[in-house]
Amino acid sequence: MPKLATFPKAELDDLVKGSMSLSDYLDFASGLDIDGVELYPLIADLKDPGSWGDYRQTCSDMGLEIPMLCCSPDFTHPDPAFRAQEIEKEKKWIEMAYALGARFCRVLSGQRRPEISREQGIDLAADAIRACLPHAGEHGVTLILENHYKDGFWEHPEFAQPMDIFCDLVDAVGEHPGFGVNYDPSNTLLAGEDPLEILSRVKHRVVTMHASDRYLKHGTLEDLAREEGVTGYAERLAHGEIGQGMNDYDAIFSTLSGTGFDGWISIEDGVDGPEQLERSVAFLRRKIKEHFS
């Protein structure tokens, strides 16, 4: 049976700036009907490595696990020195994940820089991910590649956002016991593609999932595509209550159930308040029971 975690989507900026403490967020999360919390490595209270074990114990005392660490390495930079720095950064995040008790650590391809060709970008990202795999293996951590839209601090969208590039990158990294896919259906919608199609192509590689629903506050997906050079998330993009947006969770969970999926599902929601997040948790609990029990 899949387990549910939350990611602090609504609280992330405050947690990174330090205006909200991680302890306060964990107190809030412990009141939800969830099994764990997915964390972000740039949270201010995680800067001191000496705190990692303490937060692991704090979560355990609350009956929560820390299953995943949501990291954003940028492996498609043309400068080898920059890429080497990003690899070392990912290795440090792997160590953080291990200390927190997380079994999964996200990797990305990198930014879709206009000077990087399709073939070059796939090669650079695959080489960098493979370079991290031995370190992850030593720490019992699985690297999870997400079909991502755009890190909030990036100028360009994800290089491997298009489905064909993402699938080719997964193939380029290759079969490895410490490598899998973190499936996010909403991000495929933002690429103007079908989240069920990409799931059908990578379903046997999916080991974790991000659950969200997306809305466009105004305009169209074509309008969103024209905003690719804007740093951070586009203003017209909104996270919404799960089950009320564009994703077909019955079809998604039916497909995952058919593969024997029993991994973590991490919720990205709550930007419109805790009541919204509670409804999303209840929706996902109900759908998990329907499709996986």
Image: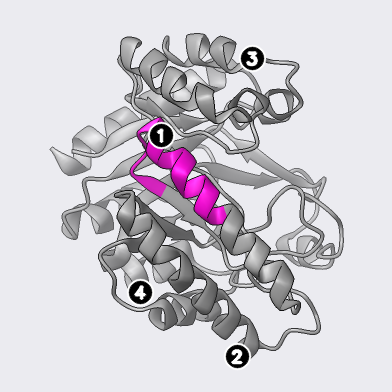
Report, in whole angstroms, how far the alpha carbon at label 2 lies from the one at label 4. 20 Å
Number of other residues with Cα within 10 Å of mark 4, as a class: few under 14, some 14 to 19, many 20 or more: few
Callout 1 secondary element: helix
Looking at the image, is mark 4 or mark 3 earlier in the sequence?
3
Callout 2 secondary element: helix
Answer whether labels 4 and 1 touch (C-beta < 8 Å). Answer: no
Answer whether labels 4 and 3 touch (C-beta < 8 Å). Answer: no
Q: Residue at 80% x, 80% y: name it.
A: 114
Give coordinates of residue 112: x percent, y percent. Answer: 72, 73
* Closer-to-camera residue (207/124): 124
Q: Name the mark on residue 99.
A: 1
Looking at the image, is mark 1 or mark 3 earlier in the sequence?
3
Looking at the image, is mark 2 or mark 3 earlier in the sequence?
3
What amino acid type is highlighted by mark number 4? Arg
What amino acid type is highlighted by mark number 1? Ala
Query: Which residue is denoted by mark 4 in the rendering?
Result: 201
Instruction: Please tell me in which quadrant of the rendered image residue 226 appears.
Output: bottom right
What are the residue bounds of the magenta stretch? 90-104
Number of other residues with Cα within 10 Å of mark 3, as a class: few under 14, some 14 to 19, many 20 or more: some
Callout 4 secondary element: helix
